């Protein structure tokens, strides 16, 4: 199963609204398996399909401790039905390189999603698990955690990223000379 390339900010696919999945077939299972492999290799605790360049409503999550990493939760067409309470914690994202910041999220959420067979499930989540779900569902709406920051912080990150991309380009140009 191939590891997919993780798309980085500011690639526009990260801003696309993901379309719902309508067919629960082998292709979907294979996609979820590739996404899981990509997430574990990164390593990360969650990955949305936009992050591998596909704007469809598929998310994989595994927040179990590093040594275990065997509690894969695929969420297809996930929706946050309600949220309450608030918690502020530091977050990062595999698509937002070298950056972390504190983000306010619901402490408790109710979620509806489909499993790999297309059966609809509803469940509740708290704390870190609730945070990861909110972060991944944001991805499906074309939203990144930096969109939750103050405009000053976001501008600083954009500048940092621009500089980084220019440096990467310069390094590439040097190689080609
Ligand atoms: Ni992310």
Image (cartoon, helix red, strand yellow):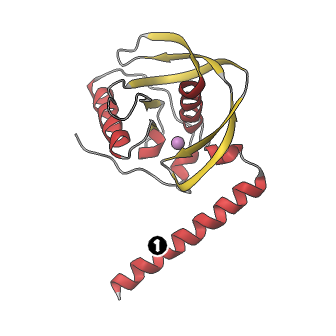
Residue 80 or 45: which is nearer the viewer?
A: 45
Residue 132 or 116: which is nearer the viewer?
A: 132
Q: Is residue 80 left or right of residue 154?
A: left
In the image, residue 156 above or below residue 131: below
Within 10 Å of the Cα at label 1, are there few (<14), some (14-19), or many (20+) other Cα atoms?
few
User: From the image, which quarter does the C terminus lie in?
Assistant: bottom left
User: From the image, which quarter does the N terminus lie in?
Assistant: top left
Label 1, on which residue?
A: 168
Name the residue furthest left: 1
In the image, residue 91 above or below residue 57: below
Q: Is residue 66 left or right of residue 97?
A: left
Specify the quadrant of the image occupied by residue 54.
top left
| Residue occupying the point 45% across, 23% down | 75
Rendering coords of residue 35 (x, y %): 35, 37
Name the residue furthest bottom: 177
Residue 135 or 55: which is nearer the viewer?
A: 135
| Residue occupying the point 56% across, 28% down | 128
In the image, residue 176 above or below residue 137: below
For mark 1, give the secondary structure. Answer: helix
Residue 34 or 103: which is nearer the viewer?
A: 103
In the image, residue 120 above or below residue 66: above
The verdict on label 1 being within 8 Å of ligand 1 is no
Q: Is residue 112 left or right of residue 104?
A: left
Rendering coords of residue 82 (x, y %): 68, 17
Q: How many marks?
A: 1
Rendering coords of residue 96 (x, y %): 54, 52
Rendering coords of residue 162 (x, y %): 59, 68
| Residue occupying the point 57% across, 54% down | 99
């Amino acid at each position: 199963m191939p590891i997919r390339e993780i798309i980085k900010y500011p690639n526009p696919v990260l801003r696309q609204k993901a379309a719902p999945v309508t067919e629960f077939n082998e292709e979907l299972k294979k996609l979820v398996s590739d996404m899981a492999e990509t997430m574990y290799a990164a390593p990360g605790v969650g990955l949305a399909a936009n992050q591998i360049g596909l704007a469809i409503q598929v998310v994989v999550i595994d927040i179990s401790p590093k040594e275990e990493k065997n509690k894969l939760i695929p969420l297809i067409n996930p929706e946050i039905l309600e949220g309450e309470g608030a918690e502020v914690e530091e977050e990062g994202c595999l698509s937002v390189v070298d950056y972390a910041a504190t983000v306010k999220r619901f402490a408790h959420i109710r979620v509806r999603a489909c499993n790999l067979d297309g059966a609809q499930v509803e469940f509740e989540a708290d704390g870190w698990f609730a945070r990861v779900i909110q972060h991944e569902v944001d991805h499906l709406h074309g939203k990144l955690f930096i969109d939750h920051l103050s405009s000053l912080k976001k501008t600083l990150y954009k500048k940092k990223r621009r500089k980084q991309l220019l440096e990467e380009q310069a390094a590439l140009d040097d190689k080609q000379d």
